[in-house]
Amino acid sequence: MNRRDQDLQRVFTRRALMLGVGQLALFGALAGRLYYLQVLESGRYTLLSDENRISMRLLPPRRGRVLDRFGTELASNRRNYRVLIVAEQARNVDATLTKLADLIHIDDTQRARVKREVERRRKFVPVVVAENLSWEDFARINLHSPDLPGVQLDVGETRDYGMGAVFSHVVGYVGAVAENELGDDPLLELPGFRIGKSGIEKLFDEDMRGRAGHSQIEVNAYGRAIRELDRTDGLTGDDVVLTIDAELQRFTAERLKDESAAAVVMDVHTGEVLTLVSNPGFDPNWFNVGITTAQWRQLNGDKYRPLTNKAVQGQYPPGSTFKMVVGLAALEAGAVTPDSRVFCPGHMEFGNNTFHCWKKGGHGSMNLVQALEESCDVYFYEAARRIGVDKIADMAKRLGLGDISGLDVTGERRGLIPTRAWKQGALGQPWAQGETLVVGIGQGYVLATPLQLCVMTARLANGGFAVRPRLVRHDDVLGPSPEQRPASQLYNSLNIKREHLEVVQEGMVRVTTPPRGTAHGARITQPQFAMAGKTGSSQVRRISKAERDTRVRKNEEKPWEERDHALFVAYAPISNPRYCIAVIVEHGGSGSKAAAPIARDILLETQRLDPSRRNRAPGPPPGTTADTPSAPQPAPAPKPREG
């Protein structure tokens, strides 16, 4: 081989070697890259693959229930068939909604709501199109689901209020999460998730929500669910147990059904609220499923104010039910004694004004017990004049008036117990002496809620113990039973002398017992259930001098809005007080005719059921025995009406 051939061979060999090295480096790099992707980065790419294949979904927890004192469900959960839409999967939301509208009813309002929520939520968050569907509608959408991109079908749970309006103000209701209520909790972004809006549902919302679960769903390239790979159910929310007796609550609601009224029943020793009804109520299920415009207008336009919880939000002049406060304040101040007498000629002259008693001819000579029995206004004008408004206010506040009770309800109002300082600060005017006389009969600036009047009655009946109302069962905070309290605590917790309380209690007993008592006709005739009480009527408009000079119209002759409010407070049994009640009938006229019979029936039913016992044998339904409040009472003896 000549030299030229040897040079060519060396060049070829060198180039072949270089090519081989290059190929080896190329394949080595490729192998290294494959090792990096398949071994070192396998976890990352497996996760990315699973994210395309597996859909992680948050599962709403089961909401806790609301129960009465015996375990009866007041708010529970039921199945909810619903259809959702996911914007990023639907591509064209309008087109999908149009197709859905051929299968189920979707009106313009629903369509606008869905589009609004799609705009404000993240595109991958499902939005509820319709819920509470029938099984037939749900099955129809399932059948056509391949032609409905972005549509998800779901079987969830929704709130159910089986007793409707009976517990509407106590339990409240849940509703959709508003934009300003969205927080850091991802639960709030779940489609159709509900939160408490009023009542117990609102106050204990976070406790009843529970904790969310999650579900792993395998989906295909189109986002359609293939199968569920894994599921971890959420934790059910806490149940809330109330002190309310559902049977008694139903009875009370039925008794008030024809009136714009409220009633509260309490245990005078523990403060447990056994019934709290404001009538009329409303169906809380309307708010859960989505209240319509017509329903909302109906509720807002009703002159009887069904959305207002009159038991805790209604503020009324207490009228003659306030006279126990004035009498007790006068006794404690030493301005009167049990034997002090005031002559009532039917009016009282004070300065340039005349203050009238409800009984035009007057009551004659009265002591405190008699003045309570016959509700003599002149006696309490004089008692108020002697002690002044500030001492009356002090006693009223000790008995629970003019302050928030702390009951587990929403929207409780404070009422108003006026003082000299209050008027100067609020109105910039000095207190007038004549205003003290008006306060003496529970009129003027004085305002109280039915709940506060019930608390007042409980503190009078239990011997002056500062009991506070309770709506939720917390056995550790209800306080000791009367048997467990020492006598010093029982009678001195409000620093009111026992003998003074007994005088006022005797006056309340005589309101219902002898024929001259203003509530004798509404008494409980069974001795073991007998009640003591006090009637009241509060004016909503002032009677002019011209009317007094001619003729004061009876309540029945006035328009409904101008009639007096009718009130009654009571406790029972007289021999060993256990329960108390306060009833207000808006524009009901006379407390003895409108409010006292209602209170009698409810208080008698309360004692028949005896809710203080945790377990009881079921009794006959209300109205089936002669001992129930629906049984006719004996004809009342002639009696005066109350002031």
Image (tube, rainbow, N blue to C red):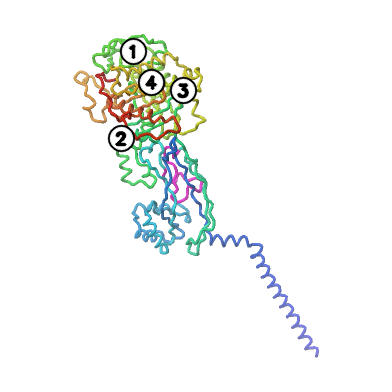
Which residue position holds label 1?
382
Cα distance between the residues tagged 1 and 4: 29 Å
Which residue position holds label 2?
257
Q: Which residues are magenta?
A: 174-202
Say left or right for 24 vs 359. Answer: right
Pinpoint residue 158: horizontal percent, then vertical percent.
42, 47
Pinpoint residue 166: horizontal percent, then vertical percent.
36, 37
Quarter holding the N terminus is bottom right
Amino acid, disc 3: Ala
Q: Is residue 638 magenta?
A: no
Does residue 272 lie above or below 226 as drawn?
above
Q: Earlier in the sequence, mark 4 or mark 3?
A: 3
Q: Earlier in the sequence, mark 1 or mark 4?
A: 1
| Farthest residue, direction left | 550
Amino acid, disc 1: Glu
Amino acid, disc 2: Lys
Q: Is residue 176 magenta?
A: yes
Q: Are discs 3 and 2 less than 8 Å apart at CB? A: no
Decide which of 124, 143 is in the foreground and name it.
143
Q: Earlier in the sequence, mark 3 or mark 1?
A: 1
Which residue position holds label 3?
466
Cα distance between the residues tagged 3 and 1: 28 Å
- Residue 174 lies in what quarter of the image? top left
- Residue 149 lies in what quarter of the image? bottom left
**Mark 2: secondary structure:** loop
Q: Earlier in the sequence, mark 3 or mark 2?
A: 2
Closer to the eye: label 3 or 1: 3
Closer to the eye: label 4 or 3: 4
Say left or right for 382 vs 476. Answer: left
Which residue position holds label 4?
574
